[in-house]
Amino acid sequence: MLKIIGYVIKDLLRNRWTLFYLLFYLLVGFAILIFSGDFSKSTVSFLQIILILTPLIGTLFGVMYYYNSRDFIELLLAQPIRRRDVFIGQWLGVSVSLGTSLVLGLGIPFLWYFAQYEVAGDQFVLLLLLGFALGTIFTGLAMAVSVSTDNKIRGFGYALVLWLLMAVVYDGFLLLALIAFRDYPLEKFALIATVFNPIDLARITILLKLDISALMGYTGAVFREFLGSTTGMILASSVLILWMLLPFALITLIAKKRDF
Amino acid sequence: MVRFIEVCKRFGKLQVLDNVSIDVEKGIRTAILGPNGSGKTTLIKTLLGMVIPDSGDVLFKGESVIGKHKYRREIVYMPQIALFPQNLTVKELLDLIPKLRRQSARYDGLIERFGVNEFMHKKMNALSGGMRQKVNLVLAFMFDVPLIILDEPTNGLDPVAVLELKKLLREEEEKGRTIIFTSHIMDFVQQMADRIVFLLEGVVKFKGTVEEILQETDSSSLEEAVASLILKNQKVKDYA
Ligand SMILES: Nc1ncnc2c1ncn2[C@@H]1O[C@H](COP(=O)(O)OP(=O)(O)O)[C@@H](O)[C@H]1O
Ligand SMILES: [Mg+2]
């Protein structure tokens, strides 16, 4: 499996995708720090990038890479390599490449900023870790969707819908539900609902860390109220780590049954 | 060495393999014949674990291959369509596959025989179909393994390369390798195969030696024999 991960990383370096994303994040990172002026504003901008953009990039790239290497996957399947390792290797290779672009691409502007101003750095480390985790989860979900269908368009469609549900629609539904049932005690429901959305989990983790109540929303407030900031954060990030196991299980299961 | 036992496979409504049972003995060259879409590639893929049979079993050296992967150390497969990462050079590809297989390979002699040495540093996507097929052949023969599977190895090859392939197959047979291949070129099959399996719509219609198929169909060439098998089955269908 390590050989496959290594191959994918080299492949993405060779066709310059890794470099492309690195430049992209560098550009975005510097732009935000330079132009947003106020540090707390730029923090919010970074938060949006991490919560919306990294899952989207993971989704698009996971699907694209899978369909582009479909031939090579067949070649790999005919070799003495475990089926699971072929697909998990692809997933991890893509995730590590995208994640490295993210960490370097935003990390370098951060370092540059820290060198000039004295601001707390630990929240940025957390932000990057969360971005890495979200990218990995969504790349994996996108690959699981792709493995399940040979129809590229359909694969793209389903994976994008999944992203849209988690990144945008989910919050709206949750809000509607909360308004509709506002006469009932909904804290537990909100807590449980959050567990099913990795983007929400990441949001709560970082907002508890930053302690920005205005952005925390209902679920964040519930986490803080029920569990306190530290416990809430640890719980939310642990569940997020568990989320990384889901693509692993899905990819393994779907790939096991497929014909190539 | 290989046993297909009552293998069935359907894709959607299409029954692609229907109760296929075949034994392939060690050191024997077996050709799988049949019109396009008769299930040859699918059959081969069940042995490689790429297609999972709905029922039945496939044994390699007496053990079921289903869900396993280590047995593939002893098999090389040359696919019908060249499946390569397009942005690698030929040399990079030839060096990559042994690493992935964790097996040593020797290709110096082979690249000369097929003239692949002339384009070792070209990228795969810059090669013509015939050139790719030659790379495909080098990949298949560069490992020292007991079973070689070739799906349409003559596709797109120039006559010189076909001759070279025939020589190579004879040498491999002398080394005791088992070879399973498919081909549309009946001359090639007649010269290269010890045994023939004829598939029609996923059903084995004939298995035996070249002489046996000629006798059974009362034909003078393999081409004629295969044509008569197809016609006979069409008639059966028409009456049915
Ligand atoms: N993965 C697949 N999904 C659906 N149908 C398939 C798949 N692979 C092959 N088929 C169908 O199965 C039939 C047999 O294909 P194949 O084994 O490639 O035939 P051959 O190699 O004899 O030409 C064809 O009709 C083909 O379209
Ligand atoms: Mg075929």
Image (cartoon, coloured by chain):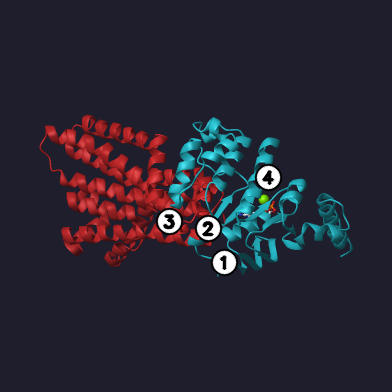
Chain colours: A red, B cyan
Quadrant housing residue A49: top left
For image coordinates 68% across by 36% down, the residue present is B160
Q: Are marks 4 and 1 in contact (CB under 8 Å)?
A: no
- Which residue is labeled 3 in the image? A85
Q: CA distance from mark 4 to mark 2?
A: 22 Å
- Which residue is labeled 1 in the image? B61
For image coordinates 21% across by 59% down, the residue present is A234
Q: Secondary structure at mark 3?
A: helix
**Residue B166 image label:** 4
Q: Secondary structure at mark 4?
A: helix
**Residue A124 image label:** none
Q: The disc numbered 1 marks a residue on which chain?
A: B
2 and 3 marks on the same chain: no
Q: Secondary structure at mark 2?
A: helix
Q: CA distance from mark 4 to mark 1?
A: 26 Å
Quadrant housing residue A52: top left
Question: Which of pointers 4 and 1 lies earlier in the amino acid sequence?
Answer: 1
| Residue type of the residue flagged with mark 3 | Asp
| Residue type of the residue flagged with mark 1 | Lys
Mark 2 surroundings: few (<14), some (14-19) or many (≥20) residues within 10 A:
some
Q: The disc numbered 2 marks a residue on which chain?
A: B
**Residue B74 image label:** 2
Relative horizontal placement of residue B131, taking residue B238 as reference (left or right): left
Q: Are marks 4 and 2 in contact (CB under 8 Å)?
A: no
